Amino acid sequence: MEADFRQRYNQTVLADRESADVPLGDEVTRQKALLNELFARVSEAIVLLDTDDRILRVNPEFTRIFGYAEEEALGRPINELVVPEELWAEAEEYTRRGTRGEILNVETMRKRKDGTRVPVSIVGVPVSIAGS
């Protein structure tokens, strides 16, 4: 797929929940605010998933590309929303790879809420958050 026509679609899978030291107080608040701002402003679709592949959060670009408001998407399996029926086997393999902690970087097709297909680059990165 040509890069000009490809939408970027980033999946972050929370693969495990190991403990780590976290700074306290104002620094935590500041870091959360910075992360929230970055998440909202990045020009690529981002979706955060739990270890069951259910949506925890989407950014505005995800909403623009796929047509789902965050409220519609929260708690639903990502594959149920954006994977065309003919690509379910591929998507399930990507899910297995992410659950194993692999970094995913592939180009494929996904579908919007209205059913139209959209070429995407999927970058999946496992993230571990202490205390979650």
Image: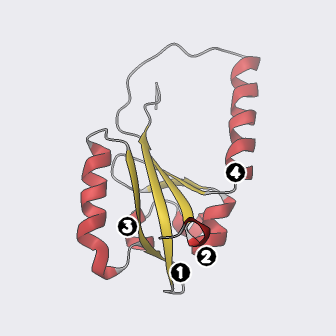
Residue 80: quarter of image: bottom left
Among numbered discs 4 and 3, the one appearing first in the sequence: 4
The residue that label 3 is drawn on is 79
Residue 68 coordinates in the image, percent (x, y):
59, 72
Q: Are circles 2 and 4 on residues that touch, CB within 8 Å?
A: no
The amino acid type found where label 3 is placed reads Asn
Q: Is residue 124 above or below residue 24?
A: below
Q: Residue at x 46, y 26 (%)?
A: 131
**Mark 3 surroundings within 10 Å by alpha-carbon count, few (fewer than 14), some (14 through 19), many (20 or more):** some
Rounded to the nearest angstrom, the CA distance separating label 2 from label 3 is 15 Å
Q: Which residue is mark 4?
A: 42
The residue depicted at 25 percent of the width and 41 percent of the height is 100
Q: Which sits in the foreground, 76 or 113?
A: 113
The disc, 1 or 4, on the residue closer to the chain's N-terminal end is 4
Q: Are marks 1 and 2 in contact (CB under 8 Å)?
A: yes
Q: Nearer the viewer's eye, disc 4 or disc 3?
A: 4
Marks 1/4: CA–CA distance? 21 Å
Q: Secondary structure at mark 2?
A: loop
Q: In terms of depth relative to the viewer, which is nearer, 103 or 75?
A: 103
Spatial separation of the CA atoms under disc 2 and disc 4: 17 Å
Q: Earlier in the sequence, mark 3 or mark 1?
A: 3
**Which amino acid type is marked by label 4?**
Val
Q: CA distance from mark 3 to mark 1?
A: 12 Å
Answer yes or no: is residue 69 visible: no
Q: Earlier in the sequence, mark 2 or mark 3?
A: 2
Residue pointed to by mark 1 = 113
> What is the crowding at mark 2: few (fewer than 14 residues within 10 Å), some, or many (at least 20)?
some
Residue holding disc 2: 67
State yes or no: discs 2 and 3 in contact (Cβ < 8 Å). no
Mark 1 or 4: the one toward you: 4
